[in-house]
Image (cartoon, rainbow, N blue to C red):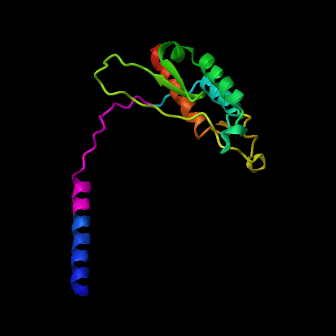
Amino acid sequence: MIKKIFKYFGLAVVALVAVLLVKTLLYQSKQPDVAYKGPVGISEMSITNLSNAIQFMTVSNEDPSLNDTSEFALFHEFLRKAYPLAHQTLKRGIHNKFALLYEWEGKDTTLKPVILLAHQDVVPVVEAEWERPPFSGLIEDGYVWGRGTLDDKGSMIAIFESVEKLIRE
């Protein structure tokens, strides 16, 4: 009886592997072909904007009462000033006091929207564990140093820089 159970289990595993293998080999990407336009230059202003964004201590603590919400308000004002075209063109909504949601309606409203996500907060830091001050936004040796450069203010600034560029074009 046990041999029979193992036999059927083994056959089920082999069948599953076969199905996964066939589906993997037959899979075709749904990504559209896009012509490569070459590297995109990064302006000094873009680098400065990232550096400035890092300097806002938008720290989210597990205990919300420890959060300095004034930093978030200042950061929002920075975004408004640094990216005027985005703020003139996109519809801006504020949720739960500090979460921002921008809506950029396309020319063809029958198409599905694009969603770009980033967050503006960072987790608390232990300054002694950092090579450079975590909120300095120091630009040195081709790097912008600070909490949020990779996760996730860097993404937010890249999105805003792209939106501004697309609006200008």
> Is any atom of residue 146 visible in this view?
no
Q: Nearer the viewer, residue 66 or 75?
A: 66
Residues in magenta, as a range: 19-38
x, y percent for residue 116: 46, 31
Q: Residue at x 51, y 17 (%)?
A: 86
Q: Is residue 166 left or right of residue 84?
A: left
- The quarter of the picture where the N terminus appears is bottom left
Q: Is residue 67 left or right of residue 103?
A: right
Q: Residue at x 24, y 81 (%)?
A: 5
Say whether residue 88 is magenta: no
Image quarter of residue 107: top left
Q: Residue at x 44, y 15 (%)?
A: 169
x, y percent for residue 77: 65, 20
Q: Is residue 55 left or right of residue 85?
A: right
Q: Report how many numbered discs are placed on residues in the image.
A: 0
x, y percent for residue 75: 65, 26
Image quarter of residue 32: top left
Outermost residue, right side: 128
Determine whether 62 is above or below 54 in the image.
below
Say whether residue 20 is magenta: yes
Image quarter of residue 33: top left
Determine whether 47 is above or below 90 in the image.
below
> Is any atom of residue 86 visible in this view?
yes
Q: Nearer the viewer, residue 163 or 45?
A: 163
Dominant SS in magenta: loop
Determine whether 36 is above or below 23 in the image.
above
Q: Residue at x 49, y 34 (%)?
A: 117
x, y percent for residue 17: 26, 66
